[in-house]
Image: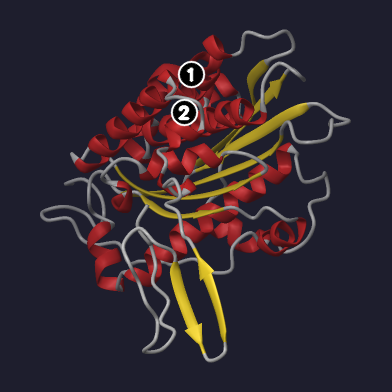
Amino acid sequence: ASILMLMRAGPRAAVRRGEPLALRTGARSSACLARRAPLRRPFLSHPLSAVRGGARDGDEAEKALVRELYAREHNGAGRAQVVVHATGAGGQLVAWLLSQPGASSVLLDFRVPYSRQAIDELLDGPPADGYCALDTSRRLARAAHRRAVALRFRSETLDAFDAASGESPATRHVGLGCTAVIASGEPKRGSHRAFVSVCSDDAEATHALVLAKGARSREEEDRLVSMAALHALERALSAPTGEAGAKKEEKKAGAAMLTGDGDNYPGGEAALGVAEALAPELSADGDSCELVHVAKRPAPLDRLLSGEVELVLCMPVRDSPGGSPGGSPG
């Protein structure tokens, strides 16, 4: 075999094809013979599907859903600004969201506050009900929603906000919070579970996912949590928003939509579809997915007075041509 690397050892070094490399440095000499080593591809150069043992059919389905979501936003069916806070699981969600073109127009930020200290900092203190709990996922979603609003506020001028206030459909801000406990190296004392919350400008909803212990690997459980988060996000972006959306739901559910009942949640039918979307995957005994919380969000000024937010931007109502200020003609 040919020498792969030559070492310079002064003018007296001699190299002959097919012979060892003789290095003479003064009174001492040494010989070495280098043989060609088999080439190895770096680990990161392997496609993800090869590392995971082959592509999954579910990945293609989720990627198709992401493509549809981005296409809908791009074509004007809705304008959404999304921030995600996920801890414990949901890692495959970011891969799906970033795998398709159009992510930059929808996804503003994706954070993984994995340690307890990181979660405490994000929530301004440790959660009272534990790190994997319904209220914790709601607080993560609300923090994500606030960040979506803040990021848009920093990137646009007041004139841009004023112009956007009259657009139809209006820009929506959606925060998604996910907290989970799934399989790891050591057995868990409690159940394998996840809570996925979405928080929009006018409503919020939370799904609880329970997975049977020992039925799946950590990767498989993470995939199911990611699927729940993706479908919850898609349903939130599909829900009717604004005055037109409210009127549509009022015709269907009447004033009961304000009660917080899941069946009467604005866009509630879409939210309930998350469990239906996961049903084919939840085949083990003990698996479940259900909508456990849904409610209208308080008005912005009420959130300010309760301390949930620190700032509310109040824009003057623009006059409508030929009509009353901010209203319909006449």
Pointer 2 residue: 231
Residue found at the far bottom of this picture: 26
Residue 196, image quadrant: top right
Viewed as shown, does residue 290 lie left or right of 189? left
Q: Residue at x 77, y 46 (%)?
A: 131
Inspect the image, locate mark 1, and give the three-letter code of the amino acid beneath it.
Gly
> For mark 1, what is the residue?
273
Residue 80: numbered disc = none
Report the side of 58 relative to 120 (left or right): left
Of 186 and 85, the residue lying toward us: 186
Q: Residue furthest front?
A: 27
Q: In the image, residue 146 lies at what x, y percent?
A: 52, 58
Q: Residue 7: x percent and y percent?
A: 42, 76
Report the front residue among 112 and 40.
40
Q: Residue furthest left?
A: 322
Evaluate if marks 1 and 2 touch, with contact meaning CB atoms under 8 Å apart: yes
148 is higher (above) or lower (below) than 314 = above
Q: Residues within 10 Å of mark 2 (few under 14, many from 20)?
A: many
Q: Residue at x 55, y 74 (%)?
A: 30
> Gap in Å between the C-alphas at discs 1 and 2?
8 Å
